[in-house]
Amino acid sequence: MTATGTGHDPAEQYHAYRRTRRNITGLVTRTPDTAAAGVPACPDWTVRDLIGHLVHICESFVALEDNQIDLRPSEGVDLPGLLDRWDALDSELSEALDRTPELRRRILLLDVFSHEMDLRVGLGETVAPSGHPAFPGALDLATMGFGLALHGENLPALRIDTPERNWVVGEGEPVATVHGPAFDVFRSLTGRRTRHQIEDLRWSGDPSVTWMPAFVWGPFAPPASEVEPVHGF
C-alpha cells in the first residue's frame, strides 16, 4: 500500500483529538434539545448516546484498557455531565497517547472524527473536512483497513485516487482505479455511503462485480438506505 505520508506523532494526534472534541461540544450545545435528536449514520443512537460512546472510548483509552473501539455508550449520565467528563479527561489524554501503540491511537482519531462528521450531517451543520487535523490520518487508516479487507477477500489490488492524494491497496499491481473527492471516499470506506453511492464514484472497473465485498470490514458496512448526501468535497 502506498500513499503520501502523514504524521502520526502523539502530540499531533492530541491536537487533532482536542480540536475534534471541541468541535463536537460546540455542535451539540449550540441549540437546545439536541440530546434526544437522532443520528442518521448511527440509527440506534441519539446525540446523547453518541457522546456517551465517545466518552466511554476516551475513558478506556486513558485507562490504557486493552480493547479496541467498544461500541457501548456510557449510561446514566445526561449530556451536560458527559461533556464535563470528556473535558476533564483532556488532562490525562496527552500522557495516554504517549504510552499507547500507534495503531490504537489512530483508531481513536478515526472514530472521533467520523462521529464529528456524523453529527454535522445529522444536525444539519456545515460539513467542512478540508484542513481538519484529524482527517488525513483517519483517511489513511480507512484505506489501510479497506486494503486488508481486499486481501482477506482475495480481491485484486485497487488504486484509490483523490485530487490531493492516492493509495494502492491490496496485494500486487492495481487492476483498476476509483476516483473521487477525499471526503466521499472516506465516507464510502467507513460505512456511511450506500452501495449505490459507492458505485457512483468514478470507477475504471465494475465495483459491484469485484470490490464491493471489501466495503464490509471491521465495524463498517454500507447502509441499506441513504444516511447522508454526497457532498463532493
Image (spheres, helix red, strand yellow):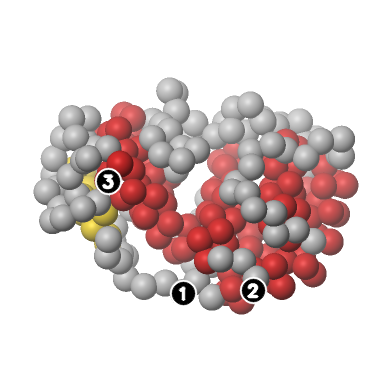
Residue 90 in percent (x, y) is at 77, 65
Mark 3 = which residue? 151
Question: Hey, which residue is sitting farthest front in the picture?
Answer: 66
Instruction: Classify 10 Å Cα crowding around label 2: few (below 14), some (14-19), many (20 and above).
Output: some
Residue 141 in percent (x, y) is at 43, 57
| C-beta proximity under 8 Å, tags 3 and 2 | no
Looking at the picture, which amino acid does disc 1 mark?
A: Gly
| Helix, strand or loop at mark 3 | helix
Mark 1 = which residue? 7
Mark 2 = which residue? 98
226 relative to 179 in the view: left or right: right
Task: Say which quadrant the N terminus sits in.
Answer: bottom left
Looking at the image, residue 221 lies above or below residue 156: above
Residue at position x 61%, y 66% in the image: 100
Q: Is residue 57 visible?
A: yes
Q: CA distance from mark 1 to mark 3?
A: 25 Å
Nearest the eye: 95 or 190: 95
Looking at the picture, which amino acid does disc 3 mark?
A: His
